[in-house]
Every structure is written in C-alpha cells, then in structure tokens.
Image: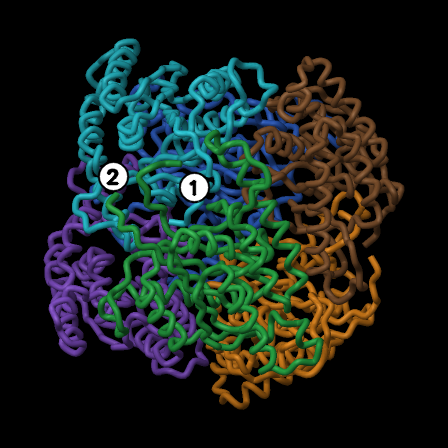
Chain colours: A orange, B brown, C cyan, D green, E purple, F blue
C-alpha cells in the first residue's frame, strides 16, 4: 500500500493518570520513532482517582494542580504533548461542547491512530464516557460539513487500552504491543504519579504478564526472548494491511 | 522484534474450491513475496459443492477427478502446493486420524500463518468441522510429547476466511487484506473452477465490495486509490506487533 | 411471491414427549389446515424422561413400549404421523448413521418447515444432540450429490421449540404462535402422556403465559381477546416474506 | 387471528437519504398495497451526508433546501408522506423534546409497523441516536398517562433497516423482504438523491445480493425465479403469527 | 472472612410498584432478619404504570397521591423505609442532580447489598435509566473526593431483579432466592397495589415457577420440599465467598 | 433452607496438574472443613503438559509414572483422594465409555459441588473436552433410568476454574473464593509438581492478583486485610440461596 510516513498518535484519557498506566508504552514507542503524540486529558482525576491527596486533607484546587503537574511530567518523560480540558470527573459528564473540543483536536493533530478507554467498565463510569466522546468526535471530524477548523479527518484506527479489571469489562485483547525496548521509560513515567503510588507495582507486573502472553502468541518468528514487556489493546475497526501476520 | 524472514502459509480447506474463493488473494500475495504456500484440501467437495457435475450425470469418481484437476490448476496459478486428504464431504467427518494427518502437515510446513474456515456456518457443516480440526491440530503440533515427525510447532496466527453468508455465520471482519496487486491472478484461479462457474462473478463483486470497505477504513495513510480489491478475515489470537496501525 | 400451497411440517424430537409439550400446538394447527405433519422421534425417552415408570419398577423394554404407546396416541390426537428411530437416550449419541436416517426422512417428507430442539440446553444433553443432527441432516439433504432416495431438499425454515428452562438455554423468542383455537387438542394430547403427568399443568400454564406475551406484542391489529394461548419459537434462518408485520 | 385491515407504516430516518437507500422497497411495497406510509426525517443530513454539496461550496441553508427537495421527490416516488423535524445532524442530539415530537407522530399515524436504524453503528453516531429515540417514543406513546393527543398506541413491530456496514454494526438479517416487484420504483427514488450519486450503484448491487440470499433461504415454496431483489431487516420484538413459515 | 453483622439493603425502584413485584420477597426476608431496608422510589409510576387510574379519569396529582399511598403501605408491610424522589416517569430522565441524590442515599444508608432494575428492557425505558443511575451513583459514592456527606462507600454487591419479560431483556438468573417463608408477606404487600391489580396473580404464579426452578437447581442439600417460592436475580459483580455452594 | 451438612467436592481435571494450579485452594479449603474431596484425573498430561520431561529424554511410561507420583503427592497435601482414568491426552478423546466412568464416580461420591475446566479454551482442546464430559456425566447421573450403581444424583452446582488465558477463554469471574487461610497448603501442593516448575511463581502471583480483586469487590463487610489470596470461578447454574450477599 502507498503509505505516507507521517505518524501522529492521539490519546484521549479520562483522568490524569490513565494514559500512563494503560498506554505509556505505546506512547513512548511512537515518540521514539519520531511520531507526534498528543494526550487529551479530559479531567485531572481530581475527585475519583486522587484518594491519597484527599485523605491528606488537600483541597480541590490543590489536587487539580498536583495531578496536572504529575501528568505534565509523565507526558514529558514519554515524549508527548498534553492538553487538559478540565471537564471535571466523578462524574465526567458528556456534552456537545466537550465533544466539539475533541473534534478540534482531531482536526488539528490529524492522528494516524487513536487510543482511548473501553466502552464498558463497571467499576468506573468516566472511562466509558470518555470512550464514547472520543469515538463520536472522530466521526464528526470526518464530515466536511462539520464546522471546525482544518480538513476533514481520514479514518484513523481506534484502540481501547486496558481497563483495570479486564474480564469484567469484556476486554479480550486483540493486539499485544511489544514495549520491551521502552519499558524503562514507561516505568519512569509511572513514577511521576505520586498520587497513585500503589499502582506502580501493579502495572509493572501487568506489563510482564502481558509480555508472557505475547511470547505465547508470538508465533515462530519471535526470536528467543526473556523479559518481554507488553501492553494489550482492543481494536475497534478492521485492520487494513497487505500481510497476514 | 527480532523476526526471521521465513514465511510459510498453510491453508486448510474443506472442499476443492474454498481456498480459491475465500483466500486466493492471500495465497497469491504471499506467493508473490516468495513465501511457501501449502493448501491442505480435506475433500474434493465431490458431493456438496459439485451440483453441476451431478446434474450432468457424472459419477462420484469422475467428479472427484474433475474437482482435483480444477483445484490443482487453481493452486498452480496462485503459486501454492496442494495436498488432497480425500476424507469425503457432506458430511466431512472429524476423526483423530484426520487431525493427526494435519498435525504432520503442520510439523512439516512450519507455517508462519494459518488460514481456514469459520467455526460457525449454519449453511454448511463441513466448514466448521474443517476449522475445528485445523485448530485442534495446530495445538497438538505444539506439544513436544505429540508423536509425529518434526519439531514442536510455534504459535502461528490463525485466520478464518470469509464464509458465503457472513452475517449469519457471525463473521465480523478483523482484517481487510489489500489484494489489489494480485487480483488478476485470483481471477485467473477462480476461472479454473468450471464446476462452480456461478461463483465467479459473485466473488469478483465481493472483492470489490471488501475493497470499498478497506478504503473506508484505511485511515489517512492510504494514498488515493481506485479499484481496490480486498479479502476479509477474522483473527483468532491477539495480533503481536510493535506498532499500532 | 409465487407460492405453492403444499405444506409439510417435520418435527424432530429427542424423546417421546418433547414434541407434545413443546410443539403440540404448532402440530395441531398445521394439521388442522390440512398440512402433512411427521414426527421423527429419536428415542422413547426411556431412561431420561420416564422416572415415574422406573420408580414403579418397570423394565427397560416395558418402558419403551409404554412411552411408544403414549406418543402414538398423542400424535394421533394432534393429527401427525410418527416414526421411532429407537436410537437410545441418556445419552442420545450422534452418529453418521442416525443423521443419514434423518436425511432420508427429509427427502421423503419434503418439509416446508422444520421444528426441533435448541442448540443449547445445560439441563439435557440429548436435546442439543437432536438439534445438531436435525440441522446437519437438513443441509446434507439439500445436496444433489448426497446418496439417498428423492430429490434434493429446498431450504425449509427451521425453528427451535421452547426448552424447559428458557433463559438458561439462551432461548429468546423470535416467534409467538397463536395456538388458541387448537389448545384443547394440545391439552388432550398432553393427557396421553401418563408417564409425565407432573408436566400437564406446567405446560398449560406456560401456554397461557406465552399467550399473555403474545397479546403484549400483538400490535394494534389483534382484536381484543381473552385467554390467548401461544407457543414460542426461535428462528434459525431469515424470514422470507413480502410483508413486514 | 382477528386482524383489521388498516395498514400504516412509520419510517424514522436520521437523515434525508436513509429511508430511501435502506427502506425504499419496503415503503413502495406497502404503498402499493394501499398502506399509509409516513417518513419522519429527523434531519436533512446537511452536515454529515452531503459531502458533495459542501465540496461544491454550497452554504448550510442551501444544502438543507437541496436535501429537503431531494427527499420530498423521493418520498413522492415511493408513495410516502414525509415530515422534516430539522433537528440538526452530526451530531443528532437526543432530547426529550424531539422524543415528544415523535410520540405525537406515533399517536397520529397509529403505525402497524415501524422502521428505523440499528442501535449500533460504529461509523455513524446519528443512526443509533435516531433508533433510540424511535424506540423510546414508541413506548411512551403506549402509555395512557402520557400527555399527547390521540389514543394510546398498541404494540406495532419494530424493524431495523440495514446499516452501511452490516457486520460491523452487528446486523444479522432476521427478515428478507421480497421487493422485486417494486424495485424499479426504488431505483427511481434513489435517483432523486443527486447529492449522494455514488450510492446508486452500491444499493442496486446490495438489492441483488440480498435477493440472492432470499432465494437461498426461500424454502421449497418459492417458485423458480431470477433477478429477485430484497431488503434485509432485523426484528426487535417477537413475530406474532398463526403460521410458522 | 471477618464479617461484621450489620446488614442494610438498598432498593432503587423506577416506579412505585416495581420494588414490590420484583423484590418484595428479598426485602421481607432481609427485614425479617433485622436488616435495615431502604427503598428509593424514583417516581410514582404516575404516567406509565397507572393505566387503570387514568382510565377512571383521575388527574395527575391524584394519581401520584394514590400511588404514593399504595407504595407506603406496601413498604410498611414488607418492613422497609421508603423515600420518593418524585423525578417523573415516562420518561424518567437521567440527570446529574438525580444521581447526586442517590449518592447521598448510598452514603447515608451504607448498603451491604443493592437491588435495582436490569440495564436492558425493550419494553420500558425507565427501568434501564433507573439501573444506570443506581450503578453510577454507587461508583461515585465510593470516591473520597465526591462532595457529599458521609464516608466513602465500600463495594456492596448489586443485583438486578426480574423484568417483566425476562428473555427479551437478556435476564439469565444468576441467583434464586428462597422466599418461601416470607411469601405471605409479599402477597400482602402486592395486594396494597390496587392500581395494578392485574399483576397480583401474575407475580404469585411467577414466584411458584421460580420456586420450581430453585428446587430443580438446589442440589442434594435441599430437604424435600413442596411449594417453594423464589425470586430471581442477576449479579453484577463477582460473588465474594469462602465456600463454593 | 433445610440443609444437610454432608459436603463432598468432586474435581474433574483433564491433566495431572490442572486441579492443583486452578483449584488447589478450593480443595484445601473444603478438606480443612472436613469435606470429602475427590479428584478425577482424566489423563496424566503426559504428552501435552510435560515438556520438560520430554526434553530430558524420558519415555512415555516414565513420564506417566512421574506425573502420577507428583499428582498423588499434591492431592495428599491438599487433603483429596485422587483417581486416574488414564484416558490419554493431546488429544483427550471424548467417548461414551469415559463419560460412563464419570457417571459412576458421581453416583459414588454424591458431590455437593463440582469443579472442572471451562467450555472454551482456544489454547488447549483437552480442557473443553473434559468440561463437556464432566457436565454431560452429571446430567446422566441424575436419571433414575441410567444403568449405574447408586442413587440418582441431585443437582450439585458446577463451577469452572480459571484457564491459563482468561480473557481469550471468555472467563468472566462469577465467584472469588477467599483461600488466604489455606494458601500455604496450596503453595506446598504446587511445589510437588516438579514437571511444571515454571508455573509456581505464575500461580502464586495470580492468587495475589485475584486476592486484590476480591478486596476490591468485597463490599463493606470484609474487615481490613492484607495479603488476601483468591481463586476465581465461573458458575454454570443459578446460585440457590436464602441471602443476597
């Protein structure tokens, strides 16, 4: 297939930490290849994912500031630009205005791939809300008649990254991404997130477990390896390719 | 990922024509890249997919001979080796012996990708039977303790090719393979199948329709194109990759 | 659509009672319209559905004779021919020979509609086994190359009748058949089945409950009614029609 | 069943063209039988489905006028009344007010069958939004306590017409409607839609393909036919009938 | 497991009658054990489930008063506190304010189990709306950062009670609750609901039918029983236990 | 509910190690409560799950002996009786004879709960084969007319234990069993399985991960805990209970 070589990754994250835990490897890998990576952070996770800060008695504005700083540092480590839409969390309320903001980001960044949450998560209502808005905005951005700056979007593939409780969210991995070579970067980015320190080990272990699964599914063409690290994704549209592998 | 460059495609087909209609493009594409392609044809489709010959008054042996000849010519056009297991059709009966024959073919050809039928087809019981045997044999071939020549198999990806009635068979395309550049070869191969002449146009149209779908899903990186041809597949195991695209 | 008026109903039943409880109304309705109705009874339900007789100390042959007699009387009341394949139950074992017998019945009776069990029933393994054989035999009977007397079969619609525990068997009714006018006949037929007397009330109640559901779904065109009786079915292939209703 | 003979078809369409491509045959067939047919068009498809007009530099109001004119002509050809709710598209935003407008149309037209979009369409968010509103309004219209003119609605059956990408939208046909005798009318109606000229051939081909599928599923009672044309539908509530066919 | 013995049941009901028909046994059983039981009644069912009163010519306010009285009496019989949120029905419109009210009830009552509607009900849009709000509010109540009185909620299990048309709502029972010993109480509570008198017998029959199903699934440890009465539920989160039974 | 206190657990395992990795905690827990626990081991896993021994050059008989010894020691540590049916693995072939053997074990052990594999496992065909036989044998054992010693079985609940790749096998946990207090015993039993040493750490980690999930789902009634260990199960029949928890 005639491909151009421009690569732009757009990651739409409900809260300040999600893009790191769930897609930090994918981001670092793309950035390392020279891709443009943009994280659209819909909220700071100030109410729903900052329990430690609340228990320490911090105020809402302090917590938002704290989470923003953490997320900025993590994005920098991963090699991504980050934008905060400050839409509030718990609940993250869907609105035409918020979707419109996402359309404008799509038009501006012209992603070649999009990452977001799953459409189902019985443990967190903000995650599906973010995913629905991400997917609706992508469709709107494709219409020449939609009133926003920029050209109509093409049809970039969309991937859901892994939710916290995979089976309960109907998450059956379609793609296992090999992030071994950038795993140290992901670990460094995770350690920027002091507000959720209890997650560090959990997501290190998950990367190793998905790595073992990758080895189990890698076919005869993966050289012998040890210590593979991986992130899992679900694909929403057919994979367009010129090779079955 | 450290990949070796050997490519071997194994296509497990219930009847003599299936591999042509449903995977002829994938075969021609791989062969054109220099891959080894092997078609394991479980039956000749002598009872279930040779209505024209029966109506012309031909006998069973003649029909088997006829379909064998057609399949051999089609395989040659596509660039594949073909083997006939002559297991009978309508019904194709599953047996440990037939599965064992497939294990031996797996061990010998060491496929890097496997193509077969869907596990569901309410219009044809032989197709799911072939798919179940193909998938079971692949698992057995992976075990060092399985008593058959050759080394234990790796974990080649498995794809179901498209059944005749996609929605009724639960076929939701995961992969759209661009076969434009080899479509003339597929057309030539289809025309070797005189016993099923009514299918020629149907599958030419399908290739164009899947081609339009490919363009609709191709994202911003596909150059402007006309007349794309495609085959659709469903993937059974996670896609192992180092790039989300 | 150009329709011919011949109507032939084929009911494939795992045990001697199933066709009465689950499809007695459909049978009586078709027979009352002058249709040919054939019941193919794969076993007598001698082991799995004759607990009362076993508890009374009867022997296997006596029980088979008893259930045969009951089923013959019920079929006569409903207006159907009945054939016993005496294949044994608990378990009803699938075999190519048994499927071949069904192919021959298909070819002979040329059904315009087929009724059988559901493909899922976690409380009874014989029911799905009967359904799989019924559906496979129908496909084989369609092939001109299949070696059995008679012409190749057309494509009669197939319906699953209601299992004992509907939700657990994934039974979501597609069709509610109004059996009000023949319900007395069905009741009479049920009362022929002395070996399963505990079911009489259960299936009378079910007919009333499905009747209420029919009224709830009947749209504006059903006249005001009371005491509607119904049987529920799941359809396996698309409904071919010239009117959406 | 005691049926009255009044027939009223209500088609709820997100955009100006949808009712033609997806249900033009069903509309023409009902109209030809003397049924009342009403199309409720929620938007003109002015932003999302008028790419050609935007590319030609037309303005929003011009485009709405253009699409309205096309839709009116197509409806006239098919024999339907059409009403425009002008609710805007891309996105079509669900609201209690819009649902209330639909309730009033239900109460006024007292449909005996309802056609609308699928509840899933990953390529177009307006389609599921229209379907959800169509289905919710139907339920509200049934309540005697709902404050709108007219009598409480009965329970007309609801059908989803075919989306553009059937498998990806989980569209498994339940009903194949024979539209052969009105296909010329549907073709004429499609040709009224100059803004979407690229769809004409696509939907002519689809009608032929669904026609072939109809023949394959028509059972032994369809006379020998050539050139059957069909539209496919999914049924949302059980089919109430007095005959299994 | 270290358990404390406090038991608090929260039932979130769309309309005034739902909690009685669908969960009256569960409520009476918990109350009989000394549990605190709270019913949050989102509407009175004044429009959608009071057809008899509308047909008698009553006005909206009268009907709301009537249904409130009935619900209060039923709750008293069952042993529950009841609160009316008076949010309107047909449609019951989801809003952040209504969800916030539920969060406050969660925080105040600290339920150890939650009962609500199913997430799917093609016959009633208010039921899924209530279920979505019930589930979202539970998640919000768990967040320390959510601004409402009380401590963050734990993770009480959530159960859907049985919808009117189980199969059409995808209701596959996970739990069969033995309500035999409190069934007289449930019957008395149902009889408080004069506005829906046609339901009394229906739900008495359902309790007997679910009772028979319970006996069928009860394993070898249920003593011989007659006249078991049961209610069915679907569980939304894994059952945490120290014994498989 | 009137319960008798006899407890008997039957575990049907395809290979020698499965019952330890996947259900060792459940077994140890039941045994510690004084329950009778019986493991029916259909094969030794001699071909499919003994790669290390094959690579060391051992012969088939040696390997079977080796795996038998390991399994006996593990069963003893857990407190279970173990029986070997020596039916062969890779493939484990279903047969009426093998099912009959299981019926006899059911009749003899009269289990109050049954554990076996999942019905789906795309990585191992023996696991679903074992599950199908386990479930079919349970149904046969319930029939008074089935010719085997002992009384007809009741209806013990059936649970699938966790497969190696949960999401790919459609394993969505219904039950999280708290095995913390017997986890040391499970660890000791795992260490008896020298042939699969690479699994020890994997299943220790899994127990901790499922333990964290248990804490997340445990509701407000679980005391504060650290280091919870758990096993996950899927339930096949409704849970019969007198308390929603």
Looking at the image, can residue B169 be seen? no
Nearer to the camera, D26 or F205: D26
**In percent of the image, x 71 and y 80: which residue is there?**
A150
Q: Given the image, what chain letter belongs to the residue carrying mark 1? A: F
Residue pointed to by mark 2: E215
Q: In the displayed structure, would residue D151 be above or below residue C42?
A: below
Apparent side of residue A64 relative to residue D159 in the rendered image (left or right): right
Q: In the displayed structure, would residue F121 be above or below residue D147?
A: above
Q: Position of residue D229 (x, y in %)?
A: 56, 45
Determine which of the numbered discs, if any, sits on residue F159 in the image: 1
Query: Can you say which quadrant of the picture contains the C terminus of chain D?
Result: top left
Q: Quadrant of residue F27?
A: top left
Nearer to the camera, D104 or A44: D104
Nearer to the camera, E153 or A105: A105
Mark 1 in CB contact with mark 2 (< 8 angstroms): no
Q: Position of residue F29 (x, y in %)?
A: 41, 44
Apparent side of residue E220 relative to residue D88 in the rendered image (left or right): left
Looking at the image, can residue C26 be seen? yes
Query: Can you say which quadrant of the picture contains the N terminus of chain D?
Result: top left
Nearer to the camera, B50 or F124: B50
Q: Quadrant of residue E162?
A: bottom left
Q: Position of residue A153 (x, y in %)?
A: 70, 72
- Dot 2 alpha-carbon crowd within 10 angstroms: few under 14, some 14 to 19, many 20 or more: many
**In percent of the image, x 20 and y 39: which residue is there?**
C205
Q: Residues under labels 1 and 2: Cα distance?
A: 19 Å
Dot 1 falls on a residue whose secondary structure is strand
**In percent of the image, x 63 and y 44: which residue is there?**
F199
Of the two numbered discs 1 and 2 in the rendering, the one whose residue sits closer to the viewer: 2
């Amino acid at each position: 297939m005639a491909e151009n070589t421009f690569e732009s990754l757009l990651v739409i994250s409900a809260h300040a930490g999600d893009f790191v835990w769930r897609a930090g490897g994918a981001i670092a890998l793309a950035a390392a290849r020279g891709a443009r990576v943009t994280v659209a952070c819909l909220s700071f996770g100030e109410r729903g994912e900052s329990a430690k800060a609340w228990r320490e008695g911090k105020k809402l504005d302090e917590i938002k500031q704290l989470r923003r700083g953490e997320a900025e540092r993590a994005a920098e480590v991963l090699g991504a630009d980050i934008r905060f839409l400050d839409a509030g969390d718990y609940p993250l309320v869907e609105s035409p205005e918020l979707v419109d903001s996402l359309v404008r980001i799509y038009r501006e960044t012209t992603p070649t791939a999009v990452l977001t949450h799953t459409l189902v998560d019985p443990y967190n209502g903000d995650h599906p809300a973010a995913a629905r808005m991400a997917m609706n905005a992508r469709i709107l951005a494709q219409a020449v008649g939609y009133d926003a700056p920029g050209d109509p979007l093409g049809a970039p593939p969309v991937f859901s990254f892994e939710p916290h409780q995979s089976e309960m969210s109907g998450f059956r991995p379609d793609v296992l991404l090999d992030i071994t070579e950038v795993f140290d970067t992901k670990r460094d980015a995770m350690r920027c997130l002091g507000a959720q320190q209890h997650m560090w080990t959990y997501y290190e272990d998950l990367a190793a477990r998905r790595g073992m699964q990758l080895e189990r599914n890698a076919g005869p063409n993966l050289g012998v390896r040890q210590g593979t690290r991986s992130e899992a994704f679900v694909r929403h549209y057919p994979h367009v390719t010129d090779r079955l592998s």
